Amino acid sequence: MSERPFYAQGLQFSCIRCSACCRYEPGYVFLSGKDVESLSIALQMEHNEFAETYCRWIPGSGGMIHLSLKEKSNYDCIFWKDGCSVYHARPLQCRTFPFWPANVASAAAWRGVAAVCPGMGKGRLYSGEYIESRLAEQKEEAILMKSI
């Protein structure tokens, strides 16, 4: 019998819109096909035009590259303008924060994220089932990648 995850009783989180997850540090917002579709529609662009304007290919493992949003020179997300300018169509990675596999891998990992995100440990209690559903959603909606 496997041990229950540390978050089985739920975790508290409340987005206070500090934008710490969207700004100031380099990072990647990997995109799925659904993300590209939603963002292209929201921005009234063709898929290729959207990708050429707002995306970059990031080296991954196994000779693959992954599609990610570009960042501004100061490391802000390309869509950050006094808040998320595409909030209604934001990518799955953004919608599921902070319930990412790496963040909920252990209590120590969760505490590490809490050190930089002031909304962690506050507000709504998200059930273990809810967290599992966000993790499953991320597994099902694969990010776009291609061979180098």
Image: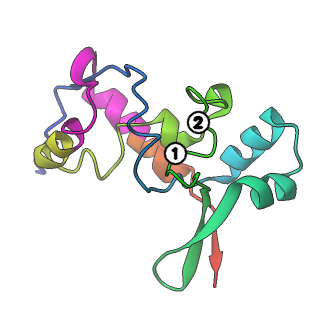
Q: Are marks 1 and 2 in contact (CB under 8 Å)?
A: yes
Q: Nearer the viewer, residue 115 or 60?
A: 115
- Which amino acid, mark 1? Asp
Viewed as shown, does residue 89 lie left or right of 117? right
The stretch of residues the image draws in magenta is 113-134
Whether residue 84 is in magenta: the answer is no
Whole-angstrom CA distance, mark 1 to mark 2, is 6 Å
**In this picture, is 56 found above or below 76?**
below
**Where is residue 18 shown, x and y percent of the image?**
39, 26
Q: Is residue 67 left or right of residue 128?
A: right
Residue marked by disc 2: 80
User: What secondary structure is found at the residue carrying circle 1?
Assistant: loop
Residue under numbered circle 1: 76
Q: Is residue 129 above or below residue 145?
A: above
Q: Residue at x 36, y 45 (%)?
A: 100
Residue sitting nearer the eye, 60 or 132: 60
* Quarter of the view holding residue 15: top left
Q: Is residue 120 left or right of residue 136?
A: left
